[in-house]
Amino acid sequence: MAEADAIKKNDELREAISAKAKEVLSVRMPEKVLVMHKMWETIGEVDLATFHQELSDSIRSTANDCRVALTKRTLDAESASDAASVHVGKKRRMDEAGTSAAASANGEQEFAATLGSNHIPDVVVESNKVIVDVIRNLKKELLEEIELLNTVKIWIQLNVPRIEDGNNFGVGIQEEMINELARAENDAINVMDSMTKYYVSRAKVVSKLMKYPTLEDYRRSVLELDEKELVNLRMCVLDLRNTYAILYDLIHKNKDKIERPRTSHHQHLY
């Protein structure tokens, strides 16, 4: 009885996957082609001149804030250093029998701690809002793409017949479709990984800019990095649109072989 229930539930799951996959092929994929094309056009409408100017003003303002904060904190650190020196001198006069070395070490540690902490400016460097919005929307589309393509892939895999000698042309088509879907899934994962690498790379350059706010090259590095990422994201959106369009076309052209990889009249040929 338990085995019969398990078989029944498994059959129901197969039917649900089949229905979902057919919906993806007939409705969702064509819709996604149009959605990704619209997103590609929207990103292309970004005026790079305005994009550079706004970003440049923001970075310049941040650099100035860092410069002011560093100057103020350096002065505070010097004052703390003078106070520590006076404190160490008093300790030496009060105890010349061996405590002077410990007091000096403590004073140097206090100064180092003060100097280190005071050279971290209280300036918040914001991410590029245009790129953050694009990444947020694209990541949502990539996650949905992985889910949709995985549904189609498992549907095709469940349609693969048992292994036999001969008449495997349709099975070869199924395997080719499965490989194409798996490749598209891996590409989506790689794109999401590149998003993380962009944030890490930008953080490194911006941290250098905060440390050396007077260097123009670091400011330009941030500009170039953001422009490169914007172009890269637009190309990723274009690739995603093309992936949907190509897979939709390939699967529909070979739908009969995917659903029925072996012909029933093959045996009559012998």
Image (cartoon, grey):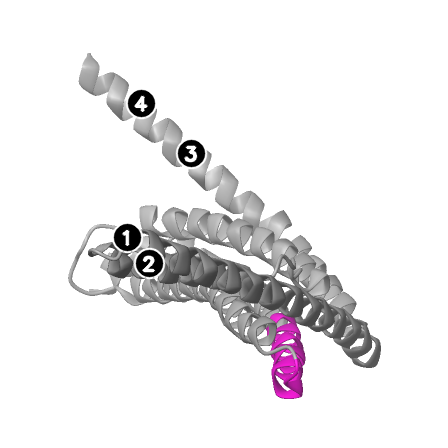
Amino acid under label 1?
Asp
Q: Secondary structure at mark 1?
A: loop
The magenta region covers 214-235
Q: Which mark is residue 95?
A: 1
Distance Cα–Cα, label 3 vs label 1 = 88 Å
The nearer-to-camera label among 2 and 3 is 2
Q: Which residue is mark 3?
A: 15
Sort mark 3 into few (<14), some (14-19) or many (20+) by Cα contacts within 10 Å: few
Distance Cα–Cα, label 1 vs label 4 = 89 Å
User: In the image, residue 242 lies at what x, y percent?
Assistant: 59, 70
Q: Secondary structure at mark 4?
A: helix
Quadrant in the picture for residue 210: bottom right
Q: Is residue 149 visible?
A: yes
Distance Cα–Cα, label 2 vs label 3 = 87 Å
Q: Which residue is mark 2?
A: 92
Distance Cα–Cα, label 1 vs label 2 = 5 Å
Closest to the observer, 104 or 182:
104
Residue at position x 31%, y 53% in the image: 264
User: In the image, residue 18 lies at what x, y percent?
Assistant: 45, 40
Total numbered labels placed on residues in the image: 4
Sort mark 2 into few (<14), some (14-19) or many (20+) by Cα contacts within 10 Å: some
Residue at position x 65%, y 59% in the image: 123
Quadrant in the picture for residue 2: top left
Q: Which residue is mark 4?
A: 8
